[in-house]
Amino acid sequence: MTKAMEILKSLTLEEKASLTSGKDCWRTVDVEGKLESIMMSDGPHGLRKEEDGRTVPATCFPSSSTVANSWDENLIYKIGEALGEECLANNVQVILGPGVNIKRSPLCGRNFEYFSEDPLLATKMASGHIRGVQSKGVGACIKHFAANNQETDRFSVNAVIDERTLREIYLSSFEEAVKEAKPWMIMSAYNKLNGDYCSENKYLLTDVLRDNWGYEGVVVSDWGAANEPVNGVKAGLDIRMPGPVPSADAAIVEAVKSGKLSMEELDKNVLRIIELVEKGVKGRIENYKTDMSAHNELAMKAAEESAVLLKNNNNFLPLGKSDKIALIGAFAEEIRYQGGGSSCVNATEVSNLLQAFDDKNIDYTYARGFKTEDDSIDDNLVLEAIAIAEKSDKIIMCMGLPFRMESEGFDRWTMSLPQNQIELFSKLAKLGKPIVIVLFQGSPVEMEWSENADSILAMYTGGQSVAKACVNLLFGDAVPCGKLSETWALKLENNPIALSFPEKGTATYSEGVYVGYRYYDKKKLDVMYPFGYGLSYTTFEYSDIKLSASEISECDSLEVSFKVKNTGSVAGKEICELYVEPTYPSVSRPVRELKGFKKISLDPGEEKTITMTLNKRSFAFYDVETHDWQVDTTVYKILVGASSRDLPLMASVKVNSSRTNKTFFTTDSRVYELNANPISKEALNKLLTEDLKLDISALSIDLPLSKLVGFSGGILSVDMLDRFVSELNKKIQ
Ligand code: GLC
């Protein structure tokens, strides 16, 4: 019998019930002489530990939306290690992050706190974060499980999502991280999912999480998210936070006594809580000291690696250190480095761009240019900015989303930057001088107004050392290598849910799997900057893609190799991206999906061979008839390149699936369905024009095949049509 089970046996019913609520806002309940209490604290990109009415100073790392742009699991692992160390130094046993909710809309207020619109990138980054934290004997808590994709009405909105979309998109951002990194805790979200609160949603907390994914850790509610206590225990919720909640504990005691809740059911949850506490207590290191200056340096490095160079006409950047520079925009002084809400960190040190310029002895003149407290235009600030710009050779304009526009608790109402910034930019652009835009924002903004900018560098919400990182990048002491983890649409109206987001009461995910680039690619919509896009100060060339086989069964793995060469004059890093594109899917699917990525360093002229391995899930879709992942027997394109819309390498592989592909066609199939596939289209054309001598131009594409018998002038019988269809299905299989 394990020690945890011995402790469980020693507990009374009342003691067990008390463990299912927090002791206070941040700690688990202790039981005198039997079980200690452990502490949990926020957040995803820095420790936010409340102590004596303040939050302890901690390193504020780049937000998750920023670090995701690094596409670097090793980097985020290091950040995780640093977070774990700061937890040890502050006697915190679990840190409440990472947040992996999918960015369904760019307006979601917490997008700065989440990784991506793509579940693979999100789950890989989350996995690195969790493994890093837990390598220090501290627990991580992946959140918010699940479908917490808006702040509006977040405590009760009902997310209505079909099973396939849920599995392929909204649960996939958790899945691999949960299975591979095994977070000590998972936080259930505030909202409902398909009618039941996530904190008492059996499908979510037991069927998927424990039975399907094999999760053995603790489920903690978001703060105030628990609903009915007994339903929570039965569904798989272990700890209701915050506590104490005596009424809930009493309801659990009463339910066991009345038989409504079995002791076995309660014991399962309590045992997990005991095991969590044991891990936390075991991980404690008294008087642990950590190197906060090293963490500050890591924060700066992470900001450098995560910044995205969106535009660089004629290689305008990097700047020369002797250039006569006008530094314009309040964000140069009032640096924007994190979003608002529970993730907010009391940063150990924050520098702004003015200080960073001074540290490098770079000459500049500064003007605030616009207000940040509201969007109104201050003419004096504008005139002052224009005046210094006229006396300078180059302009750097620092723009972005004010703190008041990006926070937990509310969604953005627009995808636009404040008008007072755009107005000022257009006036500065009229001076005809080179102009660099630096953006400080946690999520995409509309950029169609920026055509006169020579360069655009997005720093995102880059953490406490973002200013130093920015100056290093602007002047070439660092080379940009980040790529977008989310699409920047041309305008909000092009977003798949722009017409309805955010919905109150019920949020219907009618766009299905078509989120982010999955939507824009399917609709063939232009975008401002595509998913996976980012420039460097050097250039890279892709070549020589090879597959380990041209035909495999769904159970085989497939090795994909290709070469990348640094064809520029400076060393740089390149994020190589691999997408899979089914040629004839049996269900509606995105055109292509990210199925692999790798970040590599290359010196000028250096070439490397990169290998990625694909497996069944790389080709699969979630089939709602079998409630499982299935692979179609068809040909798949393997595409490799620098972004979702820059894929110079392509190779094909035929995948043979054990799944009896649904009989594709029946006599009830429509003409347009056969026309969608070249094999059946050719067969149908032959039948119609050669055998039946019909004028196909007059044929309705909605016509079911069975109607051809009546149009064939007695030539086509029902038997002949049946034979045609069965022959056709053999060809297609
Ligand atoms: C908040 C957030 C959650 C956070 C928790 C504790 O409401 O939704 O992310 O960890 O409460 O602050």
Image (spheres, rainbow, N blue to C red):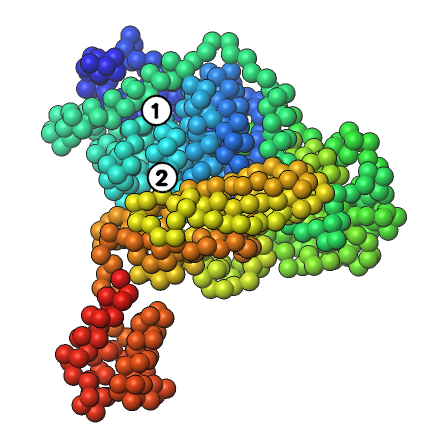
| Vertical relation: 558 (above or below) 494 | above
Left or right, 724 with reference to 423: left
Confirm whether residue 145 shows in the render: no
Instruction: Say which quarter of the image contains residue 179.
Output: top left
Say which residue label 2 marks.
Answer: 175
Left or right, 143 with reference to 450: left
Say which residue label 1 marks.
Answer: 22
Left or right, 615 with reference to 196: right
Looking at the rendered image, the quarter that the C terminus falls into is bottom left
Question: What separation in Å lies between label 2 and label 1 (alpha carbons)?
Answer: 27 Å
Q: Secondary structure at mark 1?
A: loop
Q: Secondary structure at mark 2?
A: helix
Give the residue drawn at x 48%, y 60%: 521
Which of 571/113 is in front?
Answer: 571
Q: Disc 1 residue type?
A: Gly
Which of 468/334 is in front?
Answer: 468
Left or right, 371 with reference to 729: right
Give the residue drawn at x 38%, y 14%: 281
Q: Whole-percent x and y of residue 271? A: 25, 21
Q: Disc 2 residue type?
A: Glu
Confirm whether residue 705 shows in the render: yes
